Amino acid sequence: MALKYLIDTSVLHRLKSDEVLTKVRALALNGEIARCSLTDLEYLYSARNEGEWEGASHLLSRFFNIEIQHEHFTRALQVQRILAQKSQRGRKIPDLIIAAVAEQLDLTLLHYDIDFDHIAEITGQRSEWVVPAGQIS
């Protein structure tokens, strides 16, 4: 199967939810989901020790990795400027870059973070909540 989704850290942090885990597992088994290298840094940041870091790294290795390119940073800056023009500053820098990766590779951004809705309003790209907003913490 071809890649269809780019997973965000907000989803990875909610894999303890059965509904989230079931959806992500199905996409991973079908080879439809990827992650980007910035997501790795964000997710691994929460590891409290080497064992947790190794376990989290193993989990990430189950998803195809997409390296961030210069054009992704360029697009993130463009979107950040458009948001500033609309007085909507405050989108997190990693979110802008991850969204740019998804947009430029024509992947649906799978997330659990309202910032991606704000970004998608600007870019017109596809984004999808892994489960409906507010369903899990």
Image (cartoon, rainbow, N blue to C red):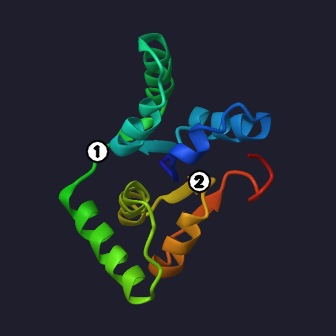
Task: Give the x, y percent position of residue 94.
Answer: 39, 54
Task: Give the x, y percent position of residue 101.
Answer: 36, 58
Q: Is residue 2 visible?
A: yes
How far apart marks 1 and 2 lie (CA) works out to: 19 Å
Residue at 28 percent across and 61 percent down: it is: 72
**Is 87 above or below relative to 41?**
below
**Is 28 above or below relative to 10?**
above
What residue did someone put label 1 on? 67
Q: In this view, does 135 lie to the left or right of 125?
A: right
Q: In this view, does 111 lie to the left or right of 41?
A: right
Task: Give the x, y percent position of residue 2.
Answer: 48, 48
**Mark 2 element type:** strand
Between 137 and 76, the one lying in front of the other is: 137
Q: Is residue 108 left or right of residue 72?
A: right
Residue 18 sits in quarter: top right
Closer to the chain start, of discs 1 and 2, is 1
Q: What residue type is labelled 1?
A: Glu
Please give the label number shown on residue 26. none
Q: What residue type is labelled 2?
A: His
Residue at 52 percent across and 52 percent down: it is: 5
What residue did someone put label 2 on? 111
Number of callouts: 2
Residue at 63 percent across and 61 percent down: it is: 128
Residue at 35 percent across and 74 percent down: it is: 80
Residue 105 sits in quarter: bottom left
Between 12 and 88, the one lying in front of the other is: 88
Q: In this view, does 74 lie to the left or right of 100?
A: left
